[in-house]
């Protein structure tokens, strides 16, 4: 994004496209992960030195114990897939 406004619009667009579902343990359980990466370049006045930073904002899908939620069908499969993806994510971090 070329500007702060563009970046915020992308963030809001991503947020509105996230899938949520109601479970017995959570009224709005996210069913997908969200990553928002911000690159920041800064230069002191009168200097040619550019400092670059990268900030990762991460919101992971809701992890719930399948045995406690009592979900079935599609929500059960989603919960299983979410837990599996978090398991693999944990192994690489």
Image (spheres, rainbow, N blue to C red):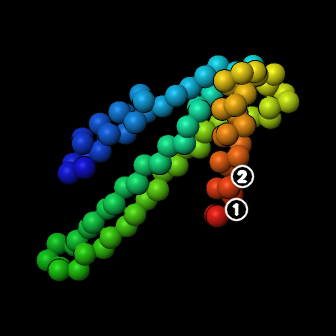
- Label 2: how many Cα within 10 Å (few below 14, some 14–19, many 20+): few
Query: Is residue 52 visible to the viewer in this orientation of the structure?
Result: yes
The secondary element bearing badge 2 is classed as helix
**Percent of width and height locating residue 2:** 20, 51
Query: Is residue 26 visible to the viewer in this orientation of the structure?
Result: no
The secondary element bearing badge 1 is classed as helix
Counting the numbered discs, the total is 2
Q: Are marks 1 and 2 in contact (CB under 8 Å)?
A: yes
Q: In front: 30, or 43?
A: 30
**Percent of width and height locating residue 22:** 64, 19
Residue 4 vs residue 93: left or right?
left
Q: Which residue is mark 1?
A: 91
Q: In front: 12, or 72?
A: 72
Label 1 – label 2 distance at C-alpha: 7 Å
**Percent of width and height locating residue 56:** 47, 56
**Residue that sits furthest to the left in the current view:** 46
Position of 74 relative to 46 (above/below): above
* Quadrant in which residue 25 is drawn: top right
Q: Residue at x 32, y 70 (%)?
A: 52
Q: Quadrant of the C terminus?
A: bottom right
**Residue that sits furthest to the right in the current view:** 67
Residue 43 vs residue 67: left or right?
left
Position of 93 relative to 88 (above/below): below
Q: Residue at x 80, y 32 (%)?
A: 66
Q: Which residue is mark 2?
A: 87
């Amino acid at each position: 994004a070329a500007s702060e406004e563009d970046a915020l619009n992308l963030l809001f667009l991503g947020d509105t496209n996230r899938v949520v579902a109601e479970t017995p343990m959570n009224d709005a359980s996210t069913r997908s992960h969200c990553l928002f990466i911000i690159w920041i370049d800064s230069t002191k006045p009168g200097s040619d030195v550019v400092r670059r930073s990268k900030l990762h904002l991460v919101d992971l899908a809701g992890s719930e114990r399948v045995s406690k939620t009592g979900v079935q069908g599609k929500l059960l499969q989603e919960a299983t897939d979410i837990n599996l993806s978090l398991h693999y994510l944990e192994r690489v971090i």
